[in-house]
Structure formats: structure tokens, C-alpha cells
Image (cartoon, grey):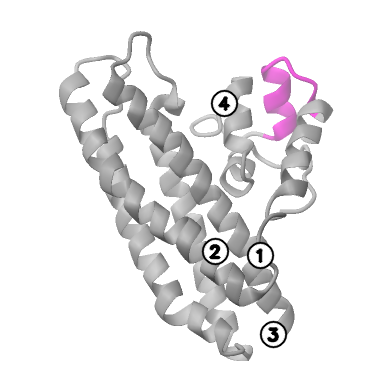
Amino acid sequence: MTRLSPDMTVSTIAAELPGAAELFRRAGISFCCGGNIALSEAARRAGLEPQDLLAKLQALADAAGRDAPEPTPALIDHILSRYHATHRAELQWLIPLAQKVERVHGDHEDAPIGLAEVLIALQDDLDAHMTKEEQVLFPMMLQGAGPMIAHPIAQMRHEHDDTARLLAGVEHAAHGLNLPEGACGSWTALYTGLRKFTSDLVAHMHLENAVLFARFDTATA
């Protein structure tokens, strides 16, 4: 995603642009259940000027991936350490914490019922996806790639779309990650961790789609 337009849907932007989800949350714009509307319409409903919101989002798009290492081997190492290892480690404690919050606060009207189940599905999805990158795609890239790399890249892009749908499920189950008044420490820690995790995951997928994969799209064109 390079140039944004007011006709793009809120849900698409939130799933593909690092930082957009948090910007939408602060603006009171739903990008989960109510996200299948154009950015211009979402801005008007939130009482915002569409061009002002678009400019803020475009600034995020222009900055995305700017700090990534330039050499491909260094970029792959960065993805492995900054994202693959981090996602795995964070899900190890986010899932049991979600289970605890659901168990203890299940009778609360804002309880994140079903959140742990979605996180487990996301963990399975990510582990399988990242393993294929680690064992197949990234070694191909480091060996110089070639025309045969087009298919695994296309498959990874498709799987990113599946992951984005699971992320929308997290947002839905957690009611937009909006803490209820008087939320306990565990609930607060869960949503704080999820904000960081979901933001990281969008940044991870953007870095692969727009930077790493794009290098090889050009090479095999």
C-alpha cells in the first residue's frame, strides 16, 4: 500500500497499514464489524474531515518500513527476530491471560467471550505460516530465488489475508480493545498486550508484502 484513497475501506486500511488501527481507535472509527465502508464515509460519521484523516494515514504509509534494513539477508534476520520470535513469545502468555479474563469476568457485559479461541486459531495459523517462511521461502530468497519463487510468495500473500481476518476476529471479540470502567489488572494487561501484538503483526505483514516480497516480484516479472 503506497497511495491511499478515500474510497478504500476502513477494514482494508486497518489490516494493511501499520498504525492505522490505533489511529481509527482514537478517532472512534470501527474497523471490525463496521469497517466495510469507504474511508470518506467513516470520517464523516466520526465528525472528521475526510482529507484530514487521509493525510494522517498517508503519513503512516510514507513512514512504514522506513527503518527496515536494506540488504535482503539483514531484512530477513530482522523479520525473524523482531516479528517471528516475538509473536510466538507473546502468544504464549496472551492466550492463558485471555482464558483467565474470560473465566473470571465471563458474566460482565463487556467480557471478551471467544477471544482465547480466536487467539489459539491465530497462533496455529501464524506458526504454520512462519514455519513455511523459515523453512522454504526465506532460504529460497537467500539462495538467489528465480522464477519458481513466484508461487510461494503468492501463497504467503494469500495467507496474510487469512491472518488479517483472524485479527479482525480478535478486534471483534475484544470489543475494539476498549477497556470497561474499573477493569482489573489482568484485563488491562491483556488489552495492552493485544494492542502491541496486533500492531506488530500488521507491521510484520506490511514489511513482507510491500518491501521483502516486492523485491522478488520485480525479479521474477
Q: Nearer the viewer, mark 3 or mark 2?
A: 2
In whole angstroms, how far apart are the C-alphas of marks 4 and 2?
Answer: 28 Å
Which of the two residues, 125 or 139, is positioned nearer the viewer here? 139
How many residues crowd around disc 3 within 10 Å: few (fewer than 14), some, or many (20 or more)?
few
Write down the residue under mark 2. 78
Q: Which residues are magenta?
A: 38-50
Q: Secondary structure at mark 4?
A: helix
Is any part of residue 174 visible from this angle?
yes
In whole angstroms, how far apart are the C-alphas of marks 1 and 4?
Answer: 30 Å
Q: Amino acid at mark 4?
A: Arg
Write down the residue under mark 4. 25
Magenta: main secondary structure? helix
Pinpoint residue 85: horizontal percent, then vertical percent.
Answer: 39, 59
Write down the residue under mark 3. 220
How many residues crowd around disc 1 within 10 Å: few (fewer than 14), some, or many (20 or more)?
some
Which of the two residues, 138 or 37, is positioned nearer the viewer here? 138
Q: Is residue 136 left or right of residue 100?
A: right
Q: Amino acid at mark 3?
A: Thr
